[in-house]
Amino acid sequence: MSGTTAPAGNFCARGAHKAARTDGGANKTLVLTGNPNAGKTSVFNRVTRSNEKVSNWHGVTVEMKSKRAAIAGGVFDVVDLPGLYSLTVYSPDEEVSRDRLLSRRDGLVINVCEVNNLSRNLYLTLQLMELGADVFVAVNMIDELTKRGKKFNAERLSRALGVPVFAMSAKNKPESDAMIKAAAEYLSKRPARQKSGGAARARAYRLPYLDALPLKRVAALTAAAAAKAGLNPEFAAIKVLEGDGFIIGSLNLSAAVLNEIDALGDTRHAVAAARFSYIDAITDGVITDAEKFEKSAGKCSPYQPRYLSAPERIESGQNAVLASGKEWGSDGQQLTCRRRARTSRTQPRRRVKRSPYQPRYLSALDRIVLNKYLALPIFLLVMAAVFALTFGLVGSLSSRLLRILMQNALYDPILNGLTAAGVPLWIRALLCDGVILGVGGILTFLPQIALLFLCLSFLEDSGYVSRVAYMTDGLFRRVGLSGRSCFTILMGLGCAATAVMTARGLEDETMRKKTVLLTPFMSCSARLPVYSVICAAFFASGSVLIIFGLYLLGAAAAIAFAALFEKCFKRLKSGKQSFIMELPPYRLPGAGRVGALVWQNVKTFLIRVATVIFALNVIVWVLSNFSFTRGYVCGTDYKSIFETLGAFLAPLFSPLGFGSWRAVTALMGGLIAKEVVITSIESLGGAAAVFTGVHAKEAALSFMIFTLLYTPCVATLAAVKREAGTKWMLLSLSLQSCTAYAAAAVFYGACRAFSASPGLFIGAIIFGAVALFTATVAVRALKRGASCPYLCADCPHKKGSAGE
Amino acid sequence: MTLLDAAPQTHYVIRSIAGEGFARRRLLDMGFVKKSRIFVAGRAPFCGAVLVSLRGSLIALRADAAATIELGAV
């Protein structure tokens, strides 16, 4: 193909900026933006040595992050924004990005693109150029392309777009550094922009596809309003054509103007189609087979083939670009068609093969994992494997080893030493029972917690979590959630307080708040030691099964409540937001990244243990071992402070089977941090001392159910308040407490009833089940007339059948 | 024929995008424009999302969004 005449953009912009040169030391900001999951945060972490969360799914970053970094001899503010597909936005995290990009047009916008989805990524690039931002394109994940035996022609794309393009892989630190250095140099060397330069720059980019749109007409109608709102008039006109509610709202257009714009027809599609057809034209030949590339690159220019980095290369290429700059005239659309027609006529087979729009067939793994019938069983198996690894042999063995080590290396020698030194009994007891057994006890769960986070980060980074979202959406839709909620809910297995934040990517407000409310029902890693210790004390053999059952119970409670809200409360019904989600390709998580993620979670855990949990545990121990009047009470008949106070609350819990002051004390500590539940139990004499009597096993199970479901910790409540407001936080508090109480009471009551008279109990259960089934069938039968299998807002199928 | 009724493992060309509001805008922004080629990769369990390949990426669409996409033969 005619590789020498690259589809041209133009660099006229450069001349314009030379004229506009003012002072050299203007704003030095590098803003990272781009599509979700393009690798913005990876780049940010690399260049600022940060440790922000990175993962292989869309919408990990929900906040703007800014950090100062020294790059290429200057100091720059590097800003990381949540990903977005378009400047017309849908969810709160995208709003953050849009607001930043619209309000402050200083500095350089580094548009991180993913090479696998280049054309969709460039869609945002074009919008940034329409906006008049100073754009620098960084094409990420080049290594994945190289692995497939293809090459990326950065220089060709740069000429076509008229902005610098840098090919890199964020996995590789030198490449990320080189990219940011090139961007920084580009920003420093090129002239500072005029303050009102947005429109001038956008015009300087001269995007030919815009000529095909009725932009002038709309601009004439909206220019005055745009000037008033402080927007670039041409950009505002494009957004009006696109039907962007935010821009139209801020322009405050009159009804007459809106009607006139409506009369232009389907402009929304026209704008999107114009952009994509331009992209199709300029990306033609940008990604080629490796050997073809060498040839075309040789013909094309004297540039170094792989990277286009430093600005001087762009400058040096200027003349060549200007010479061919006329190819994209006002009839840009026609050119695209001609080009396409020609290629498809001459070599249809090879064209399809080389095209960047080659369909992505499902990989062999996806064909099994996403199979209609196997998908959910495989998901359950994967989760079961995670729990078997965490709680089964590997996890519990290493925990037990640590425990023995702690007993022999710490507890015994210290107790003996203190006894020999004649230290008072209560100090000995505080140090050994309170601190070493309590706080030290929780430390023995470090291997299990590390394993859990290892599994979770592996699932996330491989891209499996996105697949889970896709395959559970059918189920979740029925209960008013979307597959996207699945991320948040699965993250709840790690830590609910951080998981709640990821809900920001959800578009529908009610759905977002419901997800926030339901996520704490998932059993977080802090509750893990509680199950482990109690199961080890009472159910030695079946502990993995019981724990898996508890996790399932948490998930079931969340889904049951979602269904209840959706069906029974009109105000909590989710809006008709559509679920459109991208599935990232499978990626083998890098050992370094997974390691860093696990280490970060382990570090958080250790810091919590050393601060909050340690302090709380000492307080709990003191209050449980000292009486109001008599001081230290161990071994005497006087009641400790907690025993006295707990006596008031304990009867409340006797229907649940654990009406002892020790259990109540442990639960109260758990309000602040769930780990305290187990440290308290340990320092109050262990699980065997807390659950006594004939029904100790049932009481222990009921206690675990209560711990699983009751009020989330303070940190989670604060997160819920931040994401959904005080009302929802109070709702979360009361909902979880009541659920926990009811579930534990029902469970314990059922156990007691079963042991009292098994026959009657089973009979009642069967009767209840039959009654419930009959009622459901009756309700279904009554409702059937109104149901449509498609479940869409304005169902075209129903209308069609009604018309016949 | 809409995407909802499309046969899996088949190539199509997009004829039109019906619907309105946010869902349509997002479809357009993701690259669902007329004349684009699309490959139907599969369907999720429980009448869930439709999985399509468009412009090199895999995109899952819920039934209501899929029903707005009118397809034609390649």
Image: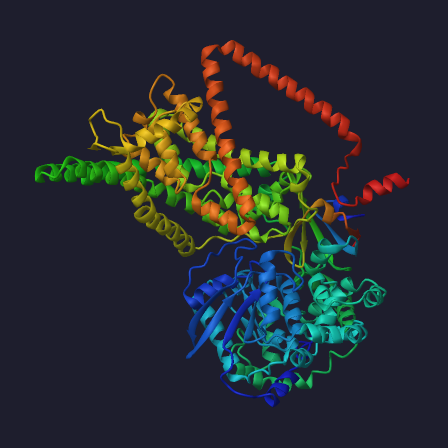
Vertically, is A783 above or below A755? below
Q: Quadrant of the C terminus of chain A?
A: top right
Give percent across and percent down for residue A762: 54, 13
**Along the line of sight, the residue nearer the viewer: A663 or A770:** A663
The extreme right residue here reads A804
Which quarter of the figure has residue A323?
bottom right
Going by the image, does A386 lie left or right of A36?
left
Say how the picture is coloured: rainbow
Which quarter of the figure has residue A162?
bottom right
**Along the line of sight, the residue nearer the viewer: A595 or A45:** A45
Q: Quadrant of the N terminus of chain A?
A: bottom right
Which residue is at a point 42% across and 47% down the rendered structure image? A454
Q: Can the viewer see residue A394?
A: no
Going by the image, does A89 lie left or right of A706?
right
Give percent across and percent down for residue A720: 51, 47
Going by the image, does A776 lie left or right of A660?
right
Which quarter of the figure has residue A205?
bottom right
Vertically, is A611 above or below A804? below
Vertically, is A449 above or below A361? above
Q: Can the viewer see residue A682?
A: yes
Give percent across and percent down for residue A645: 34, 31
Please state the total of marks drawn on the protein image. Answer: 0
Which residue is at a point 61% across and 67% down the rendered structure image? A287
**Along the line of sight, the residue nearer the viewer: A292 or A553:** A553
The extreme bottom residue here reads A19
Going by the image, does A418 lie left or right of A375?
left
